[in-house]
Image: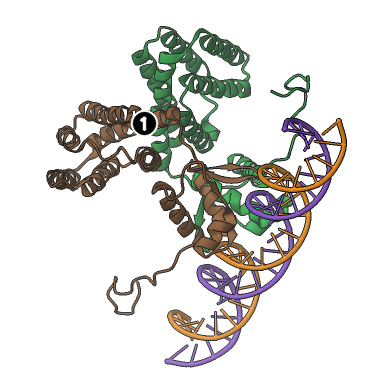
Chain colours: A green, B brown, C orange, D purple
Amino acid sequence: MLSTGLPQGAVPKLERPGPLRDRVYEALLELITTRALQPGQHLVESELAGHLGVSRQPVREALQRLNTEGWVDLRPAQGAFVHEPTEEEADQLLTVRTLLEAEAARLAAAHADKAGIAALEELCAEGEKAVAADDVDTAVALNARFHAKIMDLAGNTVLAELAAQVDRRVRWYYTPVARQRGQQSWIEHRGMIAAITARDEQRATELMREHTEHTRRSYHARAKS
Amino acid sequence: MLSTGLPQGAVPKLERPGPLRDRVYEALLELITTRALQPGQHLVESELAGHLGVSRQPVREALQRLNTEGWVDLRPAQGAFVHEPTEEEADQLLTVRTLLEAEAARLAAAHADKAGIAALEELCAEGEKAVAADDVDTAVALNARFHAKIMDLAGNTVLAELAAQVDRRVRWYYTPVARQRGQQSWIEHRGMIAAITARDEQRATELMREHTEHTRRSYHARAKS
DNA sequence: TGATTGTCTTTCGTCTACAGTCTACGGCGC
DNA sequence: GCGCCGTAGACTGTAGACGAAAGACAATCA
């Protein structure tokens, strides 16, 4: 134990900028998810490096990571290209997402404690408020936090990491579509909280599966138009 | 169309060495999975570079990728360490593996054609033969191929990639244990083929879940001893 | 006029070099 | 003898430079 007598969080840990590659990674991910870099676009290392004010090396390492996570395709001797999602791939991602979220709901139903359930209800209430106020941005953000909280309650780190990646990509593919389904979504959330509270694994799984399948269908309906 | 008049496959595509980083990646992965590099060990870039006869850069990129895939932990300003699996993490991985494999079985049951089923039976027959001959190595390899084939029949690339990663790590954690469960395993495989042939998704899922849960239990039993 | 070939530019892949940071060890004071 | 501080070594993080491959364009020949 440190004997400085200072309170734990008082010294802000000497905020270090952290490895450059990570900041480059986040910057690029932001650019991709916001469509500032469009799918299929050729990412020239030196350009990015110059634009971000760093050398090529951190850029390369960031691209490497983005590649393994499926955001960019790294063609040998040709460079990096922003990944172009196909219809098929998007559908497969949705399938996997449904699977992971459903399992998370099951585990959450098995393990959740009172504090966790309270947190879910809190989020749900806020979400309903946001929907009522037509505050779409907040509602979307709260939706993400709700699902993240369930993942948290599931207590499976591996599952959480996979789900986080899949989720992010799904959101990227369907960004233009994601703002639908305000009200119904939160009604379903309520049902899931009930199932989790009752420790009903079966029902929690079922509800989450239905829930994500609903979003999937609304995605597809939109995609066709 | 090429007008050289040469048969299509005659020219072996001029075997290119491929990007150095990939070969380094595979070499390191091999070293890790075979325990030549032990968990917790500090990986010094220059050492690896010298040992593999390349510069530090390809090594760094390979380490980067290994990091995102969970094989090494990259502590800032300290370097790379081979990941040390905890009991908890291993269990979580097994959970996820069960989940992914079960879904694959379901999808396989939904989509498999005759050729695919024939391939499964072929693999199963060979596997049984290997078990009968006490050829453990071959049996293990065939087991992996059997599961891979099911994943293939499922026709979901995203799912397949996730499962491949999870599977490989599971095998790493339990390498010393994995050679058990020869005969019973292949009996269960037979059952799954039947379910897939009958297009019985429910049953295929259930069997695969049971199957991987069995392996999980045998893992745990071994881990305790 | 069309195809082919040679060259040229662009960009990637790799290597070497330098600066910053962490760790470990030895000396010094108490 | 014990603990602290300073210094040295080692390793990582970053930058810059060189060689090589791929693609584009123009000139040439049938």
Can I make out residue A22 in this image?
A: yes
Q: Chain of mark 1?
A: B
Q: Is residue A40 visible?
A: no
Q: Is residue A106 above or below residue B207?
A: above
Q: Count all numbered tags in the image, as a single digit.
A: 1
Residue at 38 percent across and 41 percent down: it is: B172
Q: Which residue is mark 1?
A: B94
Q: Quadrant of the C terminus of chain B?
A: top left
What residue lies at 51% left-to-right and 10% top-to-bottom? A117
The image position of residue A225, as x and y in percent, is 45, 35
Vertical position of residue A3 compared to residue A91: above or below: above
Q: Could you say where residue B192 lies in the image, as x and y percent from the top left?
A: 19, 34
Q: Is residue D23 left or right of residue B215?
A: right
- The quarter in which the N terminus of chain B is drawn is bottom left
Q: Position of residue A194 (x, y in %)?
A: 44, 8
Residue A195 pos. (x, y %): 41, 10
**Residue B206, picture quadrant:** top left
Classify residue B68 as left or right of residue B35. right
Quarter where residue B188 is shown: top left
The residue type indicated by label 1 comes to Leu
Check the image and report above or below for A36 versus B223. Answer: below
- At label 1, counting other C-alpha atoms closer than 10 Å, the crowd grade (few under 14, some 14-19, many 20 or more) is many
Dot 1 lies on which element?
A: helix
Instruction: Give me the residue at 18% from left, 36% from top.
Output: B189
Foreground of the two, C29 or B128:
C29
